Amino acid sequence: MNTNDPVPNPNINILEYLNKQKGFENKVAVFTSWQIFPAILNVKRSGLPVNSGYTNFDDAKADERLKYLNEIQHKVPEMLGPDERLDFLTYEFSKEYIKQYKPRVLYMGFDETDDLAHDGNYKFYLQSANKEDGFLGELWQYLQTDPQYKDKTTLIITCDHGRGDVPLENWRDHGTDTPHSEQTWFAVIGPDTPPTGVIKSQTTTYHKQLAQTIAQLLGFDFKAAAGHEVGDPVNTVIDK
Ligand SMILES: [Zn+2]
């Protein structure tokens, strides 16, 4: 299967796994711009709260700011189509949710840079990446002012694929026909990840290692429980 159709994912995801662990029950939440995530995270099975696309955040306990976001998200033009919410809304929903509900794990999925690159809209592609950088900076600053999160919280920032570079106009695309677009990156900031300067190791790390890396940071072993292939945590690879 290799389409963007909303097929319920048969695999148990790290978020679904964490949501069932002691102390994490109902403390895992997901906000994404792309409407397909309820299928990716198989909400029917997982029971995860997943707010995606231009769907309202529906909870009787939601505070005024979350209700206001529900209201205004239908007032912006759907510039990326009806299935891709603008990222500032996804970010604001996430931020207000964190402030009110204090989740222990939150997954936030943006969309704009991918869509704008496919459109060849370089100006707004850069601007969107810059705005998203700002969101992450603001989020980190907030986490450092809240005693529940301060010095206890890790942010992992990554992308689901790279983009082409040969020839250069292939920056718009990605996929099996686009060389080098399988190359990705991730960044980690948090109390268990000391800044050690430039990494000199030549080790290649893979996205399939991130699930177990997240589990390990929280003291769990996802690999043993997943029932499907899961990579080793990133640090053990770098330490070799
Ligand atoms: Zn894409």
Image: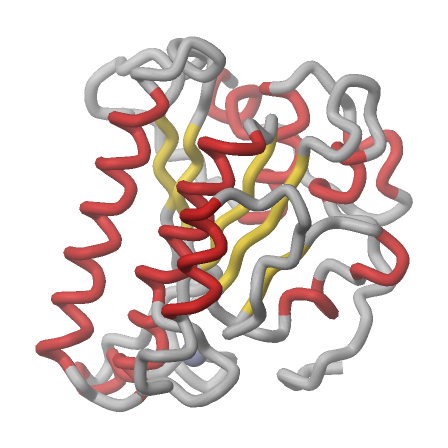
Q: Position of residue 222 (x, y in %)?
A: 78, 31
Asked if residue 194 lies left or right of residue 56, the reply is left
Q: Nearer the viewer, residue 54 or 108?
A: 54
Q: Position of residue 148 (x, y in %)?
A: 49, 13
- For the N terminus, give its image quadrant: bottom right
Q: Quadrant of residue 233?
A: top right
Q: Residue furthest left?
A: 123
Asked if residue 182 lies left or right of residue 228, the reply is left
207 w.r.t. 149: above or below: below
220 w.r.t. 26: above or below: above
Quadrant position of ligand 1: bottom left
Residue at 44% across / 64% down in the picture?
161
168 w.r.t. 109: above or below: below
166 w.r.t. 180: above or below: below
Q: Quadrant of residue 85?
A: bottom left
Q: Nearer the viewer, residue 150 or 158?
A: 150
Residue at 14% across / 67% down in the picture?
126
Q: Position of residue 67 (x, y in %)?
A: 49, 56
Q: Is residue 180 visible?
A: no
Q: Nearer the viewer, residue 234 or 52?
A: 52
Q: How are the colours assigned in the image?
A: secondary structure
Residue at 26% across / 46% down in the picture?
135
Task: Count all numbered tags in the image, as a single digit.
Answer: 0
Residue at 35% across / 64% down in the picture?
87
Q: Is residue 133 visible?
A: yes
Asked if residue 148 lies left or right of residue 1, the reply is left
Q: Quadrant of residue 75?
A: bottom left
Q: Position of residue 176 (x, y in %)?
A: 51, 80
